[in-house]
Amino acid sequence: MSETRSIRWHHRWSIVPLLVLVVLAILTPNTVWNVLLITLGGIYLISYIWARQLLTHLSGERVLQGSWIAVGDRLIERFVIKNKSVLPALWVELTDESNIPGYRPSVAYQILGQKEHKWRQTAVCQQRGRFTIGPWQLRTGDPFGLFEIIIAYPQTEEMIIHPPLDLELNFTLPTGLQQGDVIGRDRAMQVTNNIAGVRGYQPMDPLSWIHWPSTARTGTLAVREFDIEAAGDAWILIDLEQKWHVGEELESTEEYGVMLASALSTRILAKNRAVGLATYGSQPLILPSQKGAPQHWKILSALAELTADGATAWESSLDDIGQVISRGSSLILLTPNPTADWLSNVVDLLRKQIKITVILLDRDSFLDGDEEQTAVFNLQEQVQQIGFKVDIIQRGDITLPQAVAEPEEEFTISPLGRAVRKKADG
């Protein structure tokens, strides 16, 4: 780990008394001035030697525990400060410039000679997003406070705090258009995990589809034929049109939408199904449907930075996603839009044999409105008449992660250079 070390006068004016004594000793020789000059000069010399020892023999290290951190998880870092000098560091202050909300690892300790101090710093992650750990530095000084030593560690480490991976949901996951394990009558135009049989080679068939045993047996080229998968790909489309989102922090339609998308994608991927994600915020985002842990990482990383800052109308988002996803897929819509203007766009998706599930975020409940008379319930009736699944999520329907960190002691450095514990207010 690279670092920069520097030593400087703690207070530039502290050299003035020494200079004054030098001038007095030269201009008006006197035993008093000489004694004071030797005493003060000795203090300066001792302070400088002490500071140089700490400058070369003091070091720090920090290690982050774990790599996947979600809102509600406890962030844990382990720190160690080593003093390899024979002289003690009466105070060592660690200052950190990490920008993780609610995380303040800055502390101060006394470390004796040939000793080290270890501790663990924790905090509960309160906000999703992309943050940085560091840069940080150690600051110390000599016992007389004449010199200040700074050991700076400029390295930074990126940390992505994801939305919660699992939530208590009171509805079931949507399935693909093709249900069960029976073999479908329709044939896929691309490779799937289900092989229906073999057929004669046709122009434009990929060479990788050739079934060589059948070709050798019949003497003519034969290719494998694939079924549409029993459960099609699942897509999640989050409405990020800014004008419909309300609420603050974790209690907002934006945050509920992101948390639901995180929980749904986690559960669907756990069933070994492919999941895709689409959003139309200030910058459109489309993650093609895939399976496995790498896709999980991509989705969580994207969700960590989503904000409801889009100007694209929800209707336009529905039209665009209809050009991306394929027949036989399921599409989960997450929206706080309480109007019926977009229902015709959903009907167009149904005509393409895309299975639709709508999750309506009751924006009025996030505004402390009358839950029994909210517009979303009127919309629900219209949606159900069309004939697809609807769920309504209100404020409080999701158990939010507890974001209460352990109390931490705070320290300050006294004018004499000692680490003093701050008193609680009141």
Image (spheres, rainbow, N blue to C red):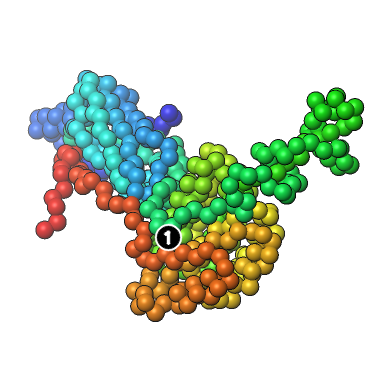
Compared to residue 269, the image places residue 386 above or below, namely below
> Can the viewer see residue 151?
no
Image quadrant in which the N terminus is located: top left
Image quadrant in which the C terminus is located: bottom left
Check disc 1 and report the residue beneath it. 256
Residue at position x 53%, y 70% in the image: 384
* Label 1 Cα crowd, 10 Å radius (few <14 / some 14-19 / many 20+): many
Name the foreground residue: 388 vs 324.
388
- Residue 47 lies, in percent from the top left, at 22, 30
The amino acid sitting under disc 1 is Tyr
- Classify residue 234 as left or right of residue 224: left
Residue at position x 26%, y 51% in the image: 404
Residue at position x 63%, y 73% in the image: 344
What kind of element bears circle 1? helix
Name the foreground residue: 96 vs 131.
131
Residue at position x 41%, y 31% in the image: 3
- Residue 21 lies, in percent from the top left, at 18, 36
